[in-house]
Image (cartoon, coloured by chain):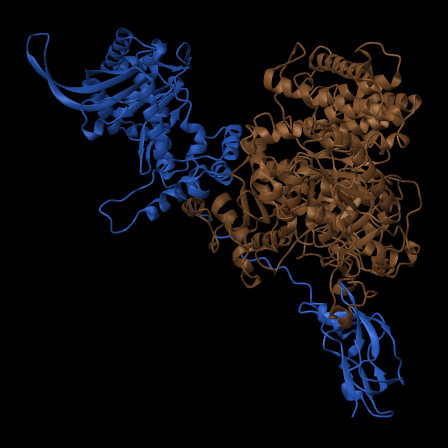
Chain colours: A brown, B blue
Amino acid sequence: MPKSLFVDPVETLAPGKITFKDIPVNVYNKTIKDERKRYSDDDLVRIYRDITVLREFESMLSLIKTQGVYNGIETTYPGPAHLSVGQEAAAVGQAYLLDQNDFSFGSHRSHSEILAKALSCIHKLSEQELMTIMEGFLGGSALRATEKLGKVDDVKELAIRFILYGTLSEIFARETGFHKGMGGSMHAFFLPFGIYPNNAIVGGSAAIATGAALFKKVNGKQGIVVCNSGDGSMARGPVWEAMNFAAMDQFHTLWESHQGGMPILYNVFNNSYGMGDQTRGETMGYDMLARIGSGVSPTQFHAERVNGFNPLAVIDAMERKLEILRKGEGPVMLDTLTYRYSGHSVSDQNAYRTKEEIEAWQAIDPIITYRKGLVEAGVTGDSDLEAILANTAERMTMICKAASDVEVSPYVDFKKDSMVVERMMFSNEKVEKFDDREPEVNMPLNEVPAYKKLKEKERCPVVDGKPVSKMKLFNLRDAMSEVIYDRFYEDPTLIAYGEDCRDWGGAFAVYRGMMDAFPHCRLFNSPIAEAAIVGTAVGYALSGGRALVELMYADFIGCAGDEIFNQMSKWQAMSAGILKMPVVLRVSVGSKYGAQHSQDWTALCAHIPGLKVCFPATPWEAKGLMESALKGTDPVVFFESQRIYDVGEQFHEGGVPAERYEIEFGDTNKVRDGKDVTILTIGAALYRAMDAAKQLSEKYGMEADVINIHSLVPLDYTKIIESVKKTGRVVLVSDACARGSFLNDVAKNITELCFDDLDAPPVVVGARNWITPPFEFDEYFFPQAGWIIDAIHEKLVPLPGHTVENGCTEAEALRRAQKGV
Amino acid sequence: MANAVIMPKAGITVESCIIGNWEKKVGDAVKVGDILFTYETDKASFECESTAEGTLLEIFFEDGDEVPCLMNVCAVGNPGEDCSALRPDGAQGAQEEAVAAPVEEVKKEAAPAAIAPTVSADGKTAVSPRAKKLAERAGVDATLATPTGPNGRIIERDVRELMENPVAAKAAEVAAAPAAAVPEQEYEDVKFSGIRRAISKSMHTSLSTMAQLTHNTSFDATAILAYRKLLKASEGECSGITLGDIVLYAVSRTLLNHPDLNAHMLDDNNIRLFKHVNLGVAVDTPRGLMVPTIFNADQKSLLEISKEVKELAAQCREGNISPDKLSGGTFTVSNLGNMGVESFTPVINPPQTGILGVCGTIERVKKGKDGEIKIYPAMGLSLTYDHRAVDGTPAARFQKELGYNLENFTMLLAK
């Protein structure tokens, strides 16, 4: 909602028509003979060699999966093998002009893309550069393993072996793989060559690659980003969200610096099938995939359709697309036609296509036609090409033998080192800034009006015995803003975006006034596209920057499910710790807005390994945790509650400190001392628990120990156990629906850790397992102070003279469970 | 006439706003729609447009002041016009007081009411892990506590209550038990008292874990009845000595010759033999059977034993006996003689190995030395013993020696 852009009714309502440019379809029509001026003979032959390397690699895997043997090497491999037999020429053509500064992302069928990009980089890099890269990767361990294959003087040949061996042993889940086998076939990659993660989720790379392009754009980095996917991914919402994100007008209309289009190529290796469904003719309506760009941007993404069975046609198209990207007129799109001879996976019975169809494509297989073309054009003799084929097979045999031999390529030893994966889950580092350049800002921090105002606020809710008025009180929202300002002025790579983050200041005003301080390239409004918001943040972070993004309502986590649960959470460990994921995802738990805007979904996030999850309930907690989150290198889901943005600091002595401090993830916050019962809280329920504690003291002479769990993952139980051992009784409260609430996990652990100290089983008081009714009925749905006292009376220790109002007897609990409510 | 411009309400939940900057000053001419001042909520900034035309006569609040929504902020009218009527009452600082509610006084209510005992649905008594741990550490039997936890569970406070006030806890429960009964039923479900539960448990354990059998014998009570008559006739404290006391005395002396019966079975392979006799005496109380102990009975005189039994029985009936005196027995005597019982099967109090039942006296006949039929008072003795520890013959030997000692009681007294 920038005021600078006038929505003119006259112009908006004026008549006219939308016109489209023609979209080129298979326009390349040159022969090898025609192209001999453009390419040297060596280049043309190398293209053939690269195709054979890819074909041999995929054929080998196919034989191992189906027959358990390749060239006499008997081995098995239980993991996935989504092979791209038939698609090699397209991959080689795409990679031909790319170098290590260009990032490529892929899909579950990306072996060929990885190897083609690697072979292209090996050709372009000097021997010296190659040695440096190989020596530097994992401390040289991968190179040492490759050297064991036999002596070789040619560094380029050594590098080819290195990349083949590292990739294959990664697929075979060996410790000698590029990521210790933790990624495997669908997540293989090699960063030093600009080969970024492939993705087992169809279309999963679209938003991530877009985030990588955003990183390059915002931080002025060289190179472009290639987002590879299959035609089957083109129906997925996150893919459309990503393309729209990359096409946003604001890059041209509003951004003060780093103007221009996103440096990204959406390339679709279009083999006509999404697993077994036929895209064109069955599950899609686009007729030709290249049409899609026209639905996203007036540039039509400069899309064109290109014959991927001819590597030279692909190179020709890539050359034109790269030029557009370098001019800042991206994004671009290629509909690269190809065909997969092998099944989707080895269990594929080809029930969806005929033998004739496969054979018709095999008849024009580039490995035959391109080779024929080379001989016909007089580039080389057939015997030389035969020798290349033999050499490729020989090399592959040697690599396969080594990668399948457990002596040479051992598995990670879980028996000897049970913590091997555990160590990869979080990087747990503190990084002040990811780049040394000066942060791009509009004015010095101490001149930012909103920041100055924030500094003038009262940090304690009561001054001289009088409560501070709401407007002058430093509240939870201010606590987060303060840290975000500070961190923006320290880490030049830090960017923040989400729905209405800029002019509006965030729906809940956490970014209030920040548009004065930061240019668009650091703080901007994203489209309403949660998958793109989180997915791009993942790509931005794994490329080397720090992202702070917001989903407005926690309920929208569902719209970004894959991006949070599969991408943000998993890449650190799947890369064996090579990638970092400094993403802070702010999600706000609503109130008053009904069933789809009021849910506490901490349990969903805490359930997913690899995410840190916090939920501050006081300004002191919010400031310390935000500071910690924005310095860390791990993905954090940062829960907030709209009930308490306005609260001041009621518990920490002296209010919220003006100086900087961090609260370590895992810590808990004890806010009240008592000996009779422990109340554990998450989120805004803290304040109702404090009411209950007051009533318990006044009416029943019972003193509650109240501890707020502001960090769910990780969680240090020390203070909790200490308290429960003291009181013997514990009630756990949060606004999450009781069934499956994270508190049940805490209760289970307390039962196990303190069983002999418990006077009664831990009791969880959560919201009812209903939809959230309208705000008027809040007290029937969300835990209230009275519910806590009722639970204590009914389940822990009967309170003399207490009358239960919202209790739940055992019979009632059974009835509710039986009904599922 | 002068008009007021009010602080707009920027949202349903917004109660007050802070004035950012005044764009106009007093004396400026303003038109409807002119921006008068900026104001902000905690979330956003806004511009306040004038709703009146004329001259800005007076500004009631300054930059940075917090103004409740809908309150007059300034007055617009003709120059010189009086606008004091539009001035909010005590404009300056009024809102501070409004929000400065007095700190609520914490009021403690009266002492908590008495804690009511609770009952479980299935009649079983559960003990919380914490209560169990505490009871073990304190050496008390948690199951004797009166439950006040949910579902009749004995919780920590119940064990603490038992530790501090062993009998009161039980008494309270006895009083409460009938309350649990459902009226207008053909029957009444009465919850066992702590003592009843203890008896139930102990007796069941006894019979289900031991190899018990009982011998019934009798002896000629002529001598002790005569001796008792003599004592009764005497004046002073000896007049209270009963037949039961006499039997206790005889048992305390006779047992010393039969160590297997003055013993505890530790397990299936070990027995602990005691050097002195700690005699358990079964006492009937309104709450059920209780068994106080006369420690070192073998070293006490008949009178001392008699006095101690009376004292212990009184304490049991009154419910103020120390738990220490309810344990530690090495052998038990249960006397049903005055109830007319002729013989019975007393149940051993584990881990003891024997219990003597004292029965009533009946008249029997026997042949005298001269062949003459003679009627004599025969008193029955029922000895139950644990066959794991004691065989039949030694048990019978004890009973025989006991009968002899009672028949020749004055001789025993002389020893």
Q: Is residue A230 above or below residue A444?
A: above
Q: Is residue A666 visible?
A: no
Q: Which quarter shows the N terminus of chain A?
A: bottom right
Q: Which quadrant of the view contains residue A519?
A: bottom right
Q: Position of residue A702 (x, y in %)?
A: 57, 49
- Residue B84 placement, left or right of B391: right
- Residue A217 placement, left or right of A426: right
Of A111 and A88, nearer the camera is: A88
Q: Is residue B97 visible?
A: yes
Q: Residue at x 52, y 51 (%)?
A: A768
Number of labelled discs? 0
Kindly give the residue lying farthest to the left in the view shown: B372
Q: Residue at x 34, y 17 (%)?
A: B252
- Residue B162 placement, left or right of A436: left
Q: Position of residue A737 (x, y in %)?
A: 55, 48
Q: Is residue A286 above or below residue A199?
A: below
Q: Position of residue A430 (x, y in %)?
A: 82, 37
Q: Is residue A288 above or below residue A363?
A: below
Of A409 and A666, nearer the camera is: A409
Of A782 and B188, nearer the camera is: A782
Q: Position of residue A98 (x, y in %)?
A: 84, 34
Q: Which quadrant of the view contains residue B221?
A: top left
